[in-house]
Each structure stands twice: as C-alpha cells, then as structure tokens.
Image (cartoon, helix red, strand yellow):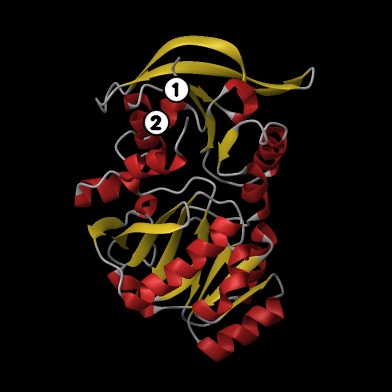
Amino acid sequence: MNKIVAIQADPIEKINPKTDTTLLLALEAQKRKHRIYWFESKDLSFINSKLFADVKELRLLSNHKKYFKIIRKKKFNLSSSKVILIRQDPPFNIDYINSTLLLDSIKNRTKIINNPESVRNISEKLFSIKFMQLMPPTIFTKNLNEIINFYQKHKKIVLKPVNGYAGKNIYFINRKLNLGALRKYLGKTGFVMVQKFLPLVKHGDKRVFIINGKVVGAIKRVPSKNSILSNISQGGKAFKTNLNKFEKKVSNHVAKVLKKNNIYFAGIDLISEKLIGDINVTSPTGLIQFKQLTGINLAEYFWDRLKLK
C-alpha cells in the first residue's frame, strides 16, 4: 500500500512552483510512490479524540504552468499518515500555534516534520540567544532607550521584528535617529532583534541547509542594487557557494543543537562568518535554487534520511 504524505502548507494554488521548496519535497515523495494529501491549518478538526483534515489528494506535475491536479477531496484521519510535513509560511501567529497544538495530539503515532512542539518552542530569532558568541553584537528589546544606546555605540544598526519573516519590516538606521519614526515602528512590531550592521552583506549572505543534524549545502544570496536584503523574495539572487572551515564549524554547532531539539530540517543564515540570528524551522526554503546551481537534489537526501518503513 502506498504511504501517505500529508502536507500542511499554504494554498496549493498560491505557491510559486519555480521556487517553492515544499513542492520539490512533495515531488520527490510522489516519485517514491507516496500519495500526497495537501491541507491548510484551517482544515484541521479534532473530533472524538481524532485529528482530521479536509485534504486534497494531488497529482503533482513538473510543468510550471500546470503543476498540480486535484484527484479528490476527502476528510482524512491524519494519524493514518506515514509522515506529516508542517510547511506553511510564517507569520508565526496564534493560528500557527494552535495548529501545532492540534498536531501534538498525534505526534507520538505519526512522524511530523518538523516536530510541532519544537516548531512552537523555537522562535526563529529568539532561539539565537543560545548562540550569541557566534553572532555580531546583538540585543533583543522593545525599549527605545536601549536601542538609542546600541545605536550610539555601533552607528549603523539593523532592526528586525522577532516574529518577522522573509525580509519584511527590516529597519536600517545608518544616519541620524528619527525618534518619532522609531517609536511608530516599535509600536507596530513589539520586540525586535537589534544588530550591528555588517557591511559585507552587499556581497551576500549564505543560507545553510541542515537536515537531520547535518550541514548538507549552502547558497549565497546577494541583494539587489541599493538594498541590504538578500532574501530571494526581496529581490536577492542566488549563487553557488561553499562554506569555509569556520563557517562549517559555526553551522555544525547550530545543527547539533537543532537535532537535540527535534528539528529535522532547518535553514540558517551567515554573513561575514557570523550567524545573523535567523534560525528557520517553520518552512525553510532555497532547495530549488540549490538544485539549479549544483545539480544536487537535497529533497532526495531529505527523504532518504527519514527512512520511512
């Protein structure tokens, strides 16, 4: 009997098939004769002590214009899955938290990647508090005076909402402080990561892929002209790269900690050999770009190491 891979993700109709890592993972699962059941967090229901989802069984296609076909829709007991992938994009909001709590109810019967408790407990920026020695000068705060003091010391700083994602709402301060604008920004974001600006970001950051506690590859993402944002979704371009000895040491250290915390698949970002605090565990991306640049399909490694029986 074919194994069922259930994928909790964003609407299949809205993904970008040219860049979407979830689609690459699903295509590889399908290649291995697994059936693909796709659902959203809104499709979850806990009834009579069972967790159900209203799923779409899909046939995935390699054609970018027509990349899926819905075979059927059904109400499905998720504990009958061989594995469930949590792959919806941030923001990590209360709906995301609730979905992990619901999935907790079956995590001892069904393999879930990444572990829902771990996804819930690992803030993608605050978790980097464990690695401060690997990072540029960084504080976490929503206190205006602390940010002013940090700015006066480092002159050029970057602010990132601790619950931000995809390079959105990044605040770069490299000239005179505008206190009014900063207050307004903090009023919207709450806690922020405040970090000394690393000028070598103009040459790109390195997105490092971690699977099952192993560093398995990296790409360089270079910002577009007049931008400090290297995210592909913000106009950054991907290039082939290698990690040097120190970057491997940093990445391996983080990878071991993530494995101890039951994270199977993650992406971390480095600039100037330093971890910049983004520990991506909700829906790490970049595998398609890595495949295009190197010819290596890390989705194969992903499924090989799961060893589904």
Residue assigned mark 1: 36
Q: Residue at x 57, y 28 (%)?
A: 40
Q: Which mark is residue 230?
A: none
Which image quadrant is residue 208 in? bottom left
- Ranked by sequence position, the earlier of labels 1 and 2 is 2
> What amino acid does circle 1 point to?
Ile
* Tags 1 and 2 touching, CB below 8 Å: yes
Q: CA distance from mark 1 to mark 2?
A: 7 Å
Q: Quadrant of residue 128?
A: bottom right
Q: Quadrant of the N terminus?
A: top left
Q: Find disc 2 in the rendering and name its residue.
A: 26
Helix, strand or loop status at disc 1: strand
Question: Residue 88's x, y, as percent?
Answer: 53, 38
Examine the rendered structure and indicate whether residue 227 appears above or below residue 31: below
- Pick whichever, 125 or 253, lies toward us: 253
Q: Residue furthest bottom?
A: 153
Within 10 angstroms of label 1, few (less than 14), some, or many (20 or more) residues? many
Give the camera-side residue of 262 and 41. 262
Nearer to the camera, 230 or 170:
230
Looking at the image, residue 55 sits to the left or right of residue 241; the answer is: right
- In this orientation, does residue 258 appear? yes
Using the rendered image of the protein, determine whether residue 177 is visible from the camera's viewpoint: no
Q: Residues within 10 Å of mark 2 (few under 14, many from 20)?
A: many
Q: Is residue 137 left or right of residue 67?
A: right
Q: Which residue corresponds to the image point at 27% horizontal and 24% vertical from the top-left?
A: 65
Residue 120 is situated, as x and y percent measured from the top left of the image, at 66, 48
Task: Name, please, the residue furthest toward the front.
Answer: 309
Task: Please state which of residues 267 and 307 is positioned toward the viewer in this rendering.
Answer: 307
